[in-house]
Image (cartoon, helix red, strand yellow):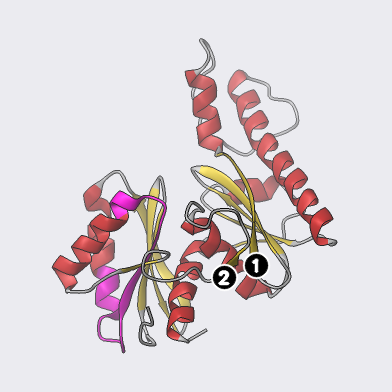
Amino acid sequence: MTPPASEGLVVIDVGNTRVGIGIWDEDGVHDVQRCANNVEASWHEPLRAAWERVKHRKHPAIVIGSVVPRLAIEICDRAAAWFEVDALRVRDDLEFPMKLVIDNTAEVGVDRVCSAAAAFERLNGACAVASFGTAITIDCVSATGEFLGGSILPGLQMSCNALHASTAALPRIIPVAPTGPFGKSTAAAIGEGVTMAAVGAMREIVERFATELGRWPQLVLTGGDAPLIRQQADFVDCVVPDLCLMGVALAYRKASGQA
């Protein structure tokens, strides 16, 4: 579809753990709120507040990037009931904001593509995008702006939970930054192992990207655990917390001819 050029968007990133709701306008993406997606009422007020901020702009719209179809549909239903607005979903209603060079475009995560597209728009060159959320995704974008695919790993908390669930004595922990190379307690050893395994995997994967590309790509981190990982990885170029929301906005802007 070809939506009209808009001066104000409510952009929504529906992840496996959290829903991010922000505003896009001439100042970019801002006023982002994040809430648990397993508590329905938690995103009601942020959605209402965001719509109040944009509803008087020219051609306001609500745009959703989601990896949880059930929740995306629920948000669409709420938008229709509350605001009489047909929310638009990336992939279902709007095309992806970049070309995909992968085997099956129907199964790729919308968050992966939106984050990659936003990173390429920001850097205008080959890049790698590592998102540290419920899962870890590490993807590659070519110098000409094509999504080439990447890797998916368990997230930090998921790895910690798996160690606890699959053993008799290992405790459940929340990942924190390692304080040194030697875990001095069982909890510290788990945190050290899980965090540095993710850092090592990212380095190896991006090195393989570089071999294929012929140069080291700029590396962008995003996601809730990105700041923790950044502390341990001096080869990261930047951390962009709202990268997926930027990509969701970009999908609309490209569809409307604004980008």
Q: Is residue 28 above or below residue 248?
A: below
| Depth order, front residue of 191/245 | 245
Instruction: Find out whether residue 65 is within the magenta segment.
Output: yes
Q: Secondary structure at mark 1?
A: strand
Percent coordinates x, y for residue 253 in the rendering: 46, 80
Any magenta on residue 239?
A: no
Q: For the residues marked 1 and 2, what is the alpha-carbon distance in whole angstroms? A: 6 Å
Mark 2 crowdedness (10 Å alpha carbons): few <14, some 14-19, many ≥20 = many
Q: Please name the residue shown 45% across and 68% down the image.
A: 248
Residue at the spot 37% in from the left edge and 85% down from the top edge: 6
Which residue position holds label 1?
A: 146
Q: Residue furthest left?
A: 81
The residue segment tinted magenta is 49-71
Pointers 1 and 2 in contact (CB under 8 A)?
Answer: yes
**214 left or right, relative to 102:** right
What kind of residue is marked 2? Met
94 w.r.t. 68: above or below: below
Viewer can see residue 234: no
Residue under numbered circle 2? 98
Left or right position of 244 against 148: left
Residue 217 is at least partly visible in this image? yes
Residue 28 or 16: which is nearer the viewer?
A: 16
| SS class, disc 2 | loop
Work out which quarter of the rendered image holds the N terminus and state it.
bottom left
Tag of residue 97: none
- x and y percentages locating residue 142 in the rendered image: 71, 66
